[in-house]
Image (tube, grey):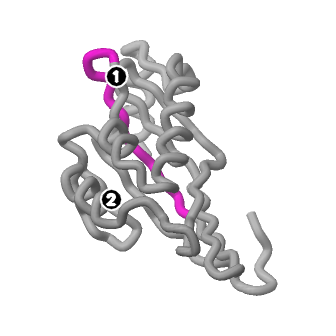
Amino acid sequence: MRRLAFTLLLLLATGVSAKQAPDAETLTRLLKEFLAGASVNDSTVHRNFWADDLIYTGSSGRRVGKADILRDVRASGAPKPGEAATVFTAEDIRIQQYGTTAIVAFKLVGVTQDSGKVTVAHYLNSGTFLKRNGRWQVVNWQATKLPAPEPGAASH
């Protein structure tokens, strides 16, 4: 608790404020454009979104870099007609900006349609964006799959 109080006091004393995210609109747009492109395995969208020095920890616990992601995207290709397709969207987007660094946290919703059956998966994702040479890119990403709600469980 003391460490948290000290950190908050230090942020206030240095003039850094998490409440002000001057680039929130830009970061939200980048996230939504990325998710639309990721839904169709667009390699250009992946190449632009991820920084070369990316550390990505997926929901399965697998840690990869940008080269790994691009290799996987190229190997998968765009969804073909009749194949299962997943559309990704973001809910509850929260952005905290500290100068040229921003934390973007959100609930990722993946809706998959396969042979007429619809499956919905939810993840809590967070990414650290850095603004380099006037351009925001992700240097760190964490995805956590949320379990399906138990039947009869109250939602929060």
Q: Kindly indicate the quadrant of the structure image that contains residue 110.
A: bottom right
24 in relation to 104, above or below: above
Give the residue drawn at x 24%, y 45%. Answer: 54
Image-quadrant location for residue 48: top left
List the residue tagged with mark 1: 135
Asked whether, in this view, residue 5 is left or right of residue 74, the answer is right
Q: Is residue 142 left or right of residue 146?
A: left
What amino acid is found at the position of numbered circle 1 in the picture?
Arg
Residue sitting nearer the eye, 110 or 155: 110
For disc 2, the neighbor class at 10 Å (few under 14, some 14 to 19, many from 20) is: some
User: Magenta part mainly helix, strand or loop?
Assistant: strand
Residue 13 falls within the magenta-colored stretch: no
* Circle 1 crowding by C-alpha within 10 Å: few under 14, some 14–19, many from 20: few
Q: Is residue 128 magenta?
A: yes
Q: Label 2 is placed on what type of residue?
A: Val
How many numbered dots are placed on residues in this image? 2
Q: CA distance from mark 2 to mark 1?
A: 23 Å
Residue underneath mark 2:
73
Residue 143 place in picture, x, y as percent? 43, 60
The outermost residue toward the bottom is: 151
Is residue 76 or residue 87 the one in the foreground? 76
**Which label lies toward us, 2 or 1?**
2
User: Residue 109 falls in which quadrant of the image?
Assistant: bottom right
Q: Position of residue 61 (x, y in %)?
A: 32, 70
Task: State the extent of the magenta-drawn residues as a range.
Answer: 123-134
